[in-house]
Amino acid sequence: MFSAERLGTMGWLAVGLLAGILLGLLVGWVLWPTQFTDADLTVLQESYRRDYTVMIAANYTLDGDLMGARRRLFQLGETDPEAWLLAVTVETILQGTAAPDAAQDVQHLVRLCRDLGLYSPLMEPYLSSE
């Protein structure tokens, strides 16, 4: 079927292929891995932009820096950041308890919306509890 010489050649070819793969992984993951710095927020997928919006609201609850929160909303690259915030707030309210910590997320979002002068009737129960 296969001669001993042909099996030896195929064995060396397999060893070389395996060594190349391992060397490539070593170089790509250990020696010179890709490092992302100062990435633009506009390239985030929509679900991650929504998560980041919730994080902006949570941070605002902690530090009370309204201008900083507004600046971070503008960095998302939305044409109307305040409409985006209101949409995320309404969507989070409508999701209810589907996500863990959803009630706390809603409180943070509603507080930021209120302080930016944004309103939706869905926010009313959360506004009266503050």
Image (spheres, grey):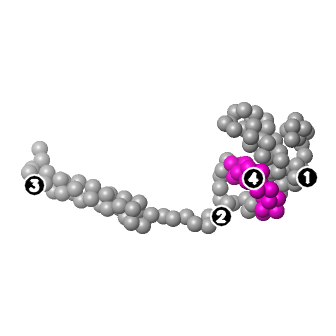
Q: Is residue 41 visible?
A: yes
Q: Earlier in the sequence, mark 3 or mark 4?
A: 3
What residue appears at the point 16 percent right and 56 percent down from the top-left corner? 9
Q: Earlier in the sequence, mark 2 or mark 1?
A: 2
Viewed as shown, does residue 30 lie left or right of 76?
left
Q: Quadrant of the N terminus?
A: top left
SS class, disc 3: helix
Q: Amino acid at mark 4?
A: Leu
SS class, disc 1: loop
Q: Which residue is mark 3?
A: 5
Q: Amino acid at mark 1?
A: Gly
Mark nearest the camera among 2 and 1 is 1
What residue appears at the point 55 percent right and 64 percent down from the top-left corner? 36
52 w.r.t. 129: above or below: below
Q: Residues within 10 Å of mark 2 (few under 14, many from 20)?
A: few
Q: Quadrant of the C terminus?
A: top right
**What whole-number distance in Å separates the C-alpha atoms at marks 1 and 3?**
81 Å
Residue 53 in the image: state x and y as whole percent. Answer: 73, 51
Q: Amino acid at mark 2?
A: Asp
Disc tally is 4
